[in-house]
Image (cartoon, helix red, strand yellow):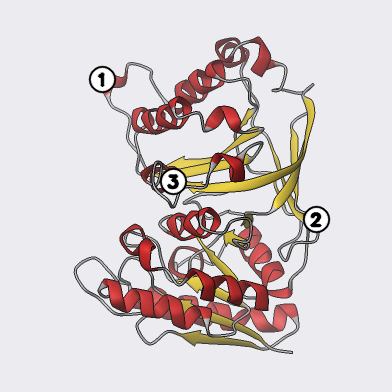
Amino acid sequence: MSKHIYLYSPSGAVRDKAAFKRGIQRLKALGPAIGTDIEVEVDDAALASQQRFAGDDATRLAAIRRAASSGADVAMITRGGYGLTRILPDLPLKQIRKAIERGTAFVGLSDFTAFQLALLAQGSGQGGITWAGPALLEAFGGEAQPDDITQACFEDLLLGQGEGTGWSLPRTREADQIAAGTWQARRLGDTAHFKVEHAPLWGGNLAVLVSLLGTPYFPSSTQTEGGLLFLEDVGEHPYRIERMLTQLLHAGVLRRQRAILLGHFTDYKLTAHDKGFKLQSVVNWLRSQLKVPVLTGLPFGHVPTKVLLPVGACCDLLVEDRQALLVWGHAHGHGPHEDHSH
């Protein structure tokens, strides 16, 4: 049986046409490795452009509707950027949920966080699972070959295999453990051992997530109480990351979680004015403010190596020594892939 991938552009315009073509060819080439034919269908407006967007708002909404009605196994965005938050009130949520029920896995990252959280927030417990994962250009369109782990996870998504993912937690220096406080220190390092069961997994891009706070498109406290919140971002200086985390802290969002999973925060530049203030400073401060485990090293974000994460799924988290295992049972998804480089 063949697999059907639908490519569409709900956010930023595709500028790199060569990367677009490379990505399509690489998706088609996955077929022999997984023992099936792969059909890649490209939305009519995938290369549309108006200002920085992939067409005007109506064009991008129509693309989402076509993706939802495509019957594809996977509906993947071409790229992130910006544009989804301005069309959230008009998202065809019922159509998207029906597509998910029929077996379409919606996958993406970055600006796609707005789509995922809106679906979750407006779902009344029936929002459906979407997947935080690769976009066409950044994962499959580069001049270098796609990352092995990212590709393997995507192949498993296509095949509907797997039930979790694992990663090695970075070593925490003694000074950082002291800065984080005694409570957090017991949950870090080589002797850490704890388990979280039956917790909703949610999150995504930090800046997009914070932009939804206080709107109807931010999941309610009922939906995220006792959750596993994962976060990543790109191009944000650590002080901006801390400022956004502080907003979530003061809003009570972070204290309601059972664990916070930090992915990668990349492509920023420290300055002389920082005087030693860096990303680890933010992590230490955040840990000192919470009695919620704050784990780092989640292989997810604007980086080549990323796992796929089921947003809205009920998950278990097991931490033993410096190994973390995230399990979501029999949800449609990918298998365990441990990234030893993180």
The residue sitting at 58% across, 48% down in the picture is 202
Q: How far apart are marks 2 and 1 (CA)?
A: 47 Å
Residue ID for mark 3: 209
Q: How many C-alpha atoms fall within 10 Å of the one at disc 3: few (<14), some, or many (≥20)?
A: many
The residue sitting at 34% across, 34% down in the picture is 237
Q: Give the vertical position of 47 relative to 329 (above or below).
A: below
The residue sitting at 71% across, 78% down in the picture is 33
Q: Which amino acid does label 1 sit on?
A: His
Q: How many C-alpha atoms fall within 10 Å of the one at disc 1: few (<14), some, or many (≥20)?
A: few
Q: Give the vertical position of 140 relative to 277 (above or below).
A: below
Picture coordinates of residue 142, whole percent (x, y): 44, 67
Total count of labels = 3
Give SS at disc 1: helix
Q: In this view, does 143 lie to the left or right of 198?
A: left
Q: What residue type is labelled 3?
A: Leu
Camera-side residue of 21 and 246: 246
Residue ID for mark 1: 273
Picture coordinates of residue 151, whole percent (x, y): 62, 66
Residue ID for mark 2: 329
The quarter in which the C terminus is drawn is top right
Furthest toward the left, the residue is 51
The residue sitting at 64% across, 40% down in the picture is 228
Picture coordinates of residue 205, whole percent (x, y): 46, 48
